[in-house]
Image: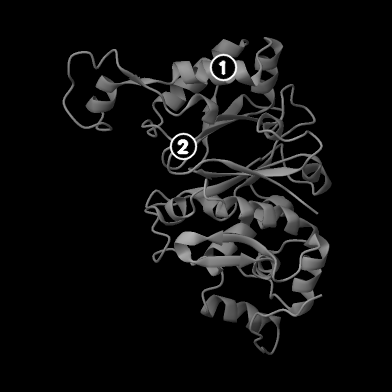
Amino acid sequence: MATLTSKRLTVRDEADAIEMAYDRGWSDGLPVVPPTEARVRAMLEAAHLPPDHQIGVIRDRAVVITAEKVAINAVMAGCRPEYLPVVAAAVEGIADPRWSYHGPGTSTGGAGVLMIVNGPVARTLDINAGDNLFGPGWRANLTIGRAVRLVMRNVCGSRPGLLDRGTLGHPGKLSYVIAENEAESPWTPLHVERGFRAEQSTVTVVASDAPNQFYNQLSNTAEGVLTTLADNMRISGQVMGQSTYVVVLAGEHMRTIAADGWDKKRIRQFLFDHTQNSHAHLKRTGRMTGDVAQGDEQKMRPLTELENILIVAAGGRAGAFSCFIPGWGSAKSSSAVTKEIRN
């Protein structure tokens, strides 16, 4: 394999290497795995990537992201070598001009990078699609997302207080990775909806706020569950034409909605129709400028464009909980991007 070009540093032991990473600002606040040459090479070999392979370019930062740099940060994050193709595809996604790195990477809005994995790789790597979906306990989920954030920090310069100006941020900025529960889902998988074949593996990257959980244990119909969801979405605070809304429907709600014969297209249309706010409401609540004028009660504004409501089947089988995830910015600011995972 070609020579690695990154600078070599000598330390006494791994404990010193961990402390050096803190001192030099390479850590996200947690200890990192020292990226020795052997570990970095093992990453690259697992993904069949030469060190100088260009994964992406962040034009606003004039930064070229190479496979070597991605592998180094994947080691630091605690990834297994077989995770690198997923990390590389996600980095390719955030470097895509449609994702528009500069906005979500620097905004005071504090977006995280939500990554939704589809296809065979999710099962092969045991990426969690079930219980405790956004929580701890799954190495693949936590380290893949952490690796992408470390690339943003150490290669692209997105450090809190400097080029990352998030006012509040949220825990998903550390790691924000899920898989769709294709095995139990009654619906078309997200990546197939977005133009890929079922047997392909993909990762969809979405600049996103934190999950907003909702509860409905009373309804035994699709319309009942989705009416509760729509009401929560409509007053979520992000009501001025967001880039995306990811809706994650967990086991109980998924089964209730599917039992009524509703597919993702019908769910999406219902939510689009029932989450719109009047201009009068938006003005009264300080989200739109100007005084309430004649006709404002009838003028309606959608949360996002119809096709930008992404429906994902995931989460635990028990419990009448699901969630929605508002996207960062407007549809013109940042779009969800899906990339094939190659190995």
Where's residue 18, x and y in %? 63, 77
Q: Is residue 198 visible?
A: yes
Image point (75%, 79%), residue name: 37
99 in relation to 61, above or below = above
Q: How is the model colour-coded?
A: one colour
Q: Which residue is located at x 83 percent, y 46 percent?
A: 124
Residue drawn where x is 40% and y is 66% of the image: 162
Is there a contact, CB below 8 Å, between mark 1 and mark 2?
Answer: no
| 10 Å crowding of disc 1: few (<14), some (14-19), many (20+) | many
Quadrant where the C terminus sits is bottom right
Residue, disc 2: 243
**Whether residue 124 is situated above or below residue 186 in the rendered picture:** below
Number of other residues with Cα within 10 Å of mark 2, as a class: few under 14, some 14 to 19, many 20 or more: many
Horizontal side of residue 95 vs 162, given as left or right: right
Question: Eyeballing the image, is 222 above or below 33?
Answer: above
Residue 200: x, y in percent? 78, 40
Residue ID for mark 1: 225
Query: Do we see residue 217 in this rendering?
Result: no
Element at badge 2? loop
**Which is closer to the viewer, label 1 or label 2?**
2
Type of amino acid at the residue the image marks with label 2: Ser
Q: Nearer the viewer, residue 140 or 187?
A: 187
Point out the image quarter for the N terminus.
bottom right
